Image: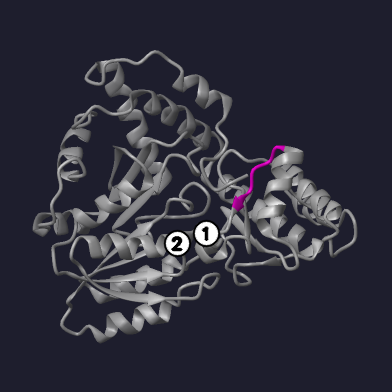
Amino acid sequence: MIPGPTPVPETVLKAMGRHPIGHRSGEFQAVVERTTAQLRWLHQTNSDVLVITGSGTAAMEAGIINTLSRGDRVICGDNGKFGERWVKVAHAYGLEVTVIKAEWGKPLDPDAFRNALEADTDKQIRAVILTHSETSTGVINDLETISRHVKAHGTALTIADCVTSLGATNVPMDTWNLDVVASGSQKGYMMPPGLSFVAMSERAWNAYERSDLPKFYLDLGPYRKTAAKNSNPFTPAVNLYFALDAALEMMQEEGLEAIFARHARHRDAAQSAMKAIGLALFAAEGHGSPAITAVAPTGIDAELLRKTVKDRFDILLAGGQDHLKGKVFRVGHLGFVCDRDVLTAVAAIEAVLISLDAHNGRMGAGVSAASSILSKS
């Protein structure tokens, strides 16, 4: 029950266990053709969705180096660990970075982006870069509104880390005018780590033509060219493509609306349960991510709670990062997670709190609250 790697369905594991095939073979090209269409469906786009053998960070870095040039002005949103990572990547490539910050646990303010963009009358800002679902804090940012402000600017691109939002909540790339969307296989895709995905709009490809940042393995031009032939410029992770094919087929069978509703229901159940137990949520009210719930217990070390849950029930929860270590624990509920998993995690947390004399509500209140939400499905 962590935000990644997430549980992998048996169907996907079995698909991945096939013997490898030649990545230039017609058989493999058929897999690429299928998954390319499925990826566009998932991203709700007619644009290119390219597959890189690498982690989600590879997709994030590719998004920057393929659309920007040294010295470009960019705005980076920073309200957590992964917002901080965007800032570090941007600085690493010599970009001129303006950071719009929010306190960890709070969402980014769309008006702060609007004000900065409207003040840029010379149209020097080339991109707005942000994280949609901030995994470190359990906060979801208002990507739709921020992207609308970027679109009104006329020049800047929207580059978004959707690593824990894609496949967990609605990310309609074309409708929201998103230019670069980065994601990774070990989250909502229900796969092991190893593949990352970069979706590029036509505006992003136009920016690619002027980009002068160094790139080779992550140069998306060759990926686009070979994808048109159902191939890849380098040796891809063939067996992870088998897994991708199986996972996306499962997702299509469930349907986007059902997937989003399931994740929202699990978020609501987890949040209601924690409140009933007497634990405070870390994310600001109304801004909790459908992918993960961050909890800030008082009077108990969150690391002790995590360790006890793991030792007694073999359930792994995520811890707090950086200054939140020991202060926050996080319950992942994205990907191949069902009602039973959420109920089991809640029951385990509640049982451990009782054993540690740290339960602040009525015994069974957490399970009852979660059950009430889940029964509405």
Q: How is the image coloured?
A: one colour
Marks 2 and 1: CB-CB under 8 Å? yes
- The magenta segment: 314-318
Residue type marked 1: Gln
Q: Is residue 45 visible?
A: no
Q: Main secondary structure of the magenta part?
A: loop
On screen, residue 174 versus residue 134, left or right, reads left
Q: Quadrant of residue 213?
A: bottom left
Residue 254 appears left or right of 20: right
List the residue tagged with mark 2: 81
Q: Within the magenta stretch, is there residue 316? A: yes
Where is residue 214 drawn, in percent x and y? Answer: 13, 52
Q: Secondary structure at mark 2?
A: helix
Q: x, y (%) of residue 81?
A: 45, 62
Q: Is residue 149 visible?
A: yes
State the residue at coordinates (48%, 59%): 133
Vertical arrangement, residue 376 with respect to residue 150, above or below: above
Residue 92 shown left or right of residue 85 in the figure: left
Q: Residue at coordinates 27% horizontally, 23% vertically from top-left?
A: 29
The foreground one among 309 and 2 is 309
- Quadrant assignment, res 85: bottom left
Q: Residue furthest right?
A: 362
At label 2, counting other C-alpha atoms closer than 10 Å, the crowd grade (few under 14, some 14-19, many 20 or more) is: some
Identity of the residue drawn at 57% across and 60% down: 325
Residue sitting nearer the eye, 213 or 121: 213
Q: Amino acid at mark 2?
A: Lys
**Residue that numbered label 1 is attached to:** 321
Q: Please, what secondary structure does the residue beneath circle 1 have?
A: loop
Q: Is residue 66 magenta?
A: no
Nearer to us of marks 2 and 1 is: 1
